[in-house]
Amino acid sequence: MKGKLEFIENFRHIEFIYEEPIDDRSCHYVSEVIPERIVKQGERAIKKYARNKIQEEKKKWRKWKSFEDDIKKNHIPIQTKYGDGTTLEGRIVEATSRYIKVRLDKPLKGSSIINFGFASAMAGDYVFAEDYKISQEGYNAAKTALGWAYRDAKNKPKKDLVNRLNKKI
């Protein structure tokens, strides 16, 4: 195991906590109360139970990672209408449990990203559904991000002008 395994006593129960770094900003995390029937069997059984549960979670993490990598290689086409009626065409080019990144292809070029943070999770909105597919909320967010990319691409000439003006001050 390359993560950190720790046991704690929590309200008369023994619980294990396992954290494994993903990158500099995040980690995989699993925590579970050890069933009393396992606790009664002793230290060896407790450690074995925790390691087995961690291995089960690692299989799921690898499957999610595989799905994320597949999206990077095989972009998912999306289409939506902007507020002015313009049809936008693009692709989901990256999706993780934390964000969706899109690339706008038509009528302009651009890209945008939408983060799914703690508030999204509290609202029950997740990038992925349980079946390793992008959720409806994920698709809706991707369409919103496509609109943002279009808006930014439409305003790029003015933004560029403002940047040039500010450099001359």
Image: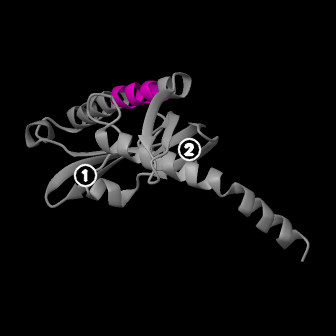
- Residue assigned mark 2: 23
| Residue 67: in magenta span | yes
Place of residue 31 in the rendered image (x, y in percent of width and height, measured from the top left): 28, 46
In which image quadrant can residue 11 be found?
bottom left
The boundaries of the magenta stretch are 59-68
| Amino acid type, residue under disc 1 in the picture | Gly
Question: Nearer the observer, disc 1 or disc 2?
Answer: 1
Does 110 sit left or right of 163 as displayed?
left
In this rendered view, identify the residue nearer to me: 4 or 162. 162
Q: CA distance from mark 1 to mark 2?
A: 25 Å
Which residue is drawn at the image coordinates 25% and 52% (left, top)? Answer: 124
Please state, as top left, top right, bottom left or bottom right, where the C terminus lies in the image.
bottom right
Is residue 150 depicted above or below 102 in this figure? below
In which image quadrant can residue 160 be found?
bottom right
Which residue is drawn at the image coordinates 14% and 41% (left, top)? Answer: 39
Place of residue 21 in the rendered image (x, y in percent of width and height, measured from the top left): 50, 43
The earlier-in-sequence mark between 1 and 2 is: 2
- Residue assigned mark 1: 124
Is residue 157 depicted above or below 162 in this figure? above
Instruction: Answer whether residue 98 is visible to the viewer in this image.
Output: no
Q: Which colour scheme appears in the figure?
A: one colour
Q: Are marks 1 and 2 in contact (CB under 8 Å)?
A: no
Q: How crowded is the residue under tag 1: few (<14 C-alpha within 10 Å), some, or many (20+)?
A: few
Place of residue 33 in the rendered image (x, y in percent of width and height, measured from the top left): 19, 47
In which image quadrant can residue 67 be found?
top left
